[in-house]
Each structure stands twice: as C-alpha cells, then as structure tokens.
Image (spheres, rainbow, N blue to C red):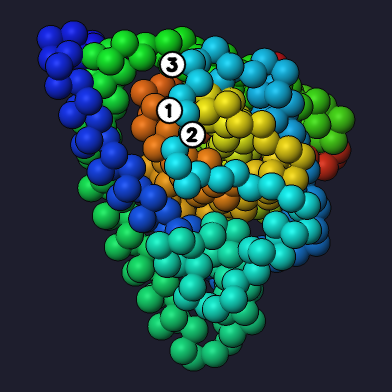
Amino acid sequence: MIGSLAGIIFQEQAGEWGKPTKLVIIAIKALALPLILFAITHVLMTAQVQGAKVGKLARLLLTNTAMAIGIGLLLANVIQPGVHSPKPAVEAGDSVASGSLLGMLEDSIPKSFLGPLGDQGKPLSVIVIAIVLGLALRTQRQNPAFATVEGLVKLALATLTVILKWVVELLPLAVLGIIASKVGTGSTKQFAALGWFVVTVCAGLLLQSAYYLLRVWRGSWVTPLQMLQGCRDALLTAFSTASSTCTMPITYTSLREKVGLREDSANLGAMVGTNFNNDGTALYEAVAALFVAQMVGISLGLPAQLVIVLTSMLAAMGAAGIPEGGAATLALVLSSVNLPVEYVALLLTVDWFVDRCRTMVNVMGDCAVSCILDGKTRGSEYPAAPI
C-alpha cells in the first residue's frame, strides 16, 4: 500500500525508488555463494546418519526432491506464468546457459579452489567444492583437529548468517522500492504475472502434498489422516513461523507422541530431514527460474532446465542452514543459468506468503519420510494417533 502511494505521488522520481532495491540484491548476490559453501559443508561434515535406515532415507530424500522439482518445472512449462508480463529487453551482456548438459557440467568443475568464489563465480562450481570438502572433512571426524575445523566452519556460517539477517532487515524497504518503481513507471502488469506465479507454486505444493500422502498410504502403517492429525501442530507452526528449523522440536515431538513412531524414525525424518528435505523450497526455486526466463522472453532448453534441477536440489540441501536464506538460494539458482538476479526483488513482493506455504510442505515432507521409515508395522511404545 505504502509503495503504491509513493509510486503515484512521486511519479517523476519513480526510477530512483528502484536503486535501494538494487543495492539489496547486490548484497544478497554477494552473500549467496559463501553461504551455500559453508552451509552444505557444515551439513555434510556434521550430519548424524547411522543405522540400516540410512540408505532408505537417502532414496526417499532424493526421490521426493526430484518429484518436487519435476512438478514445479511441469507446471511452469504448462501454465507459463511469466508470459502474462510485458517482455523487457534482456540487459546487454546477459546470456543464458545453453549447450549440452555434459558440457555445462564440465564447465562447472572448478579450475581452482577459490576461483568460483570470485565476482564471476559459478554456483555449481561452489556446490561441487562444498560437497567434496564436506565429505572429505567427514572422513576426519576422529582427528583431534576436527572439532576446531567444525567450529571454524560453524563460526563462518553463523557470521555470514548475521550479515544476511542485516540484509533481510532491509527487504521491506526493497519491496517498497520495487512496488513504487513499478507503479510510478506504469509497469504494474508484472504484478498480474506474479498472481499467476503464486497460483503455479501453490498448485505445485498441493500436488507435492498429495504425493506425500500417497507414499505414506503405500509405505507406512500410519494412515495419511493419522499423519495430518498427529502433525497438525508442526504444520501450523511451520506456516506461522516460515522456519522448518524452528519447527523441528515440535515436528519430532508430534511424530513421537502423537503419531507414535519409533525414536530412530522420528529422529531421522525430523532432525536429518530438516537439513536435506526441503522439497517445497526446491519446487519454488524451479518455478521461479522458469518464471523469470518467461518474463524476459528467454526459452530455456532441456539442458538448462536440468541444471536448474541439479542446482535446486543441492541449494535446497543447504537452505536449512541459512535462516531467511530463500532469497540467497534463489539468487544462486538464477545465476546457475545466467538469468538476471535482479528479478529476485520482484518475487520478494509475494514471498511473505509463498515462504509460509513452502515451509509447511517442507515439514510435511519430513513427517512423511519419518512415517515411511517406520515401515508397515507399528511399534508398541506409543499408541497410534486416533482417527
């Protein structure tokens, strides 16, 4: 409302209102790569995954995330929410990823360890470094120096997160600036396209939720209704806080005491799943990438869309370690196919609602994974949740 009024009153200065938004986006873009580097490294080097259920957990997480991104890309290609916006000219120097998938992946192999963190850093290269570094450090857990290295990685992530929180505090001003700029320059048709974007994301999240319920019905002693009733508090908390990390204790308690899962199943789904199972976020980022491409009038081929799939999966894995990091990981996904990161600001105008919806789906995914891990035979420690 304030942004719209500012755009109407100060039409002659409308172009200036967008400058603070550009500064915020530059800060987010600068933070994205180091945040993902330390987030993924920390997750891989510290995750407690032991026991016979680890392989099943890995398969569930991979298939769930792949399904979420597949649903997002399918709906974005069918509904095409971005075509409802007028097509601006692509900025000079912009180029979209093209060529074969193998060629693009080969180009993402880092030529030097710190090179990808430079101004022209490539997101996939940074993710490759993070995965290799995290897995390598994991093999050194018995080394006396491991605790020191873990502390340094954790400190670096915490420090960058504090800086991101400072930037996040400026997001309302960025949103006000982008709205005032669009209203003042008569570019409000982009907001109509945002409505289609929200519809597309929410439709995808509903389909992903239905997929979870189907998997629970087929693979667990818990019925879909029992899971929804038992995890109701966790789902509502996720929607109200927009944070799966803050919701994690409630998710674990609900799975143990209200649904009646075994301790190891609830622990793997709620604790480990929170770090790796961010399907709602992955779906959102896949839709957002195609939405931006459609807005600027660029057709992304299959190789570029596969890069989006890969980057979304890996970025979502590290997203849980970055509070309020949705904008940073989205900037990473857009950068992976050389789409203009500046459009993150436009998406922020509806992110307050979409973020809550995708977080609730993230938590539902954790609950579904826990139920499937528990198998088709109920344990005796806790009674099943009443229907």
Callout 1: helix, strand or loop?
Answer: helix
Residue for badge 1: 347
Query: Label 2 crowding class (10 Å Cα cut-off): few <14, some 14-19, many 20+?
Result: some
Label disc, if present, on residue 190 of the rendered structure: 3
Please indicate whether residue 284 sits to the left or right of residue 106 in the image. left
Q: Residue at x 46, y 24 (%)?
A: 88
Q: Judge from the rendering whether residue 340 lies leftward or rightward of residue 271; answer left or right.
A: left
Q: Tell which circle, 1 or 3, labels the residue nearer the N-terminal end.
A: 3
Q: Residue at x 47, y 29 (%)?
A: 89
Q: Which residue is mark 2?
A: 90
The C terminus - image quarter: top right
Q: Amino acid at mark 1?
A: Leu
Report the amino acid beneath label 3.
Gln
Frontmost residue, 321 versus 8: 8
Label 2: state its secondary structure.
Answer: loop
Amino acid type, callout 2: Val
Q: CA distance from mark 2 to mark 3?
A: 15 Å
Mark 1 in CB contact with mark 2 (< 8 angstroms): no
Q: Is residue 330 above or below residue 384?
A: below
Inspect this view and state whether residue 357 appears: no
2 or 3: tag closer to the N-terminus: 2
| Residue 298 visible in the snapshot | yes
Q: Nearer the viewer, residue 329 or 346?
A: 346
Q: Secondary structure at mark 3?
A: helix
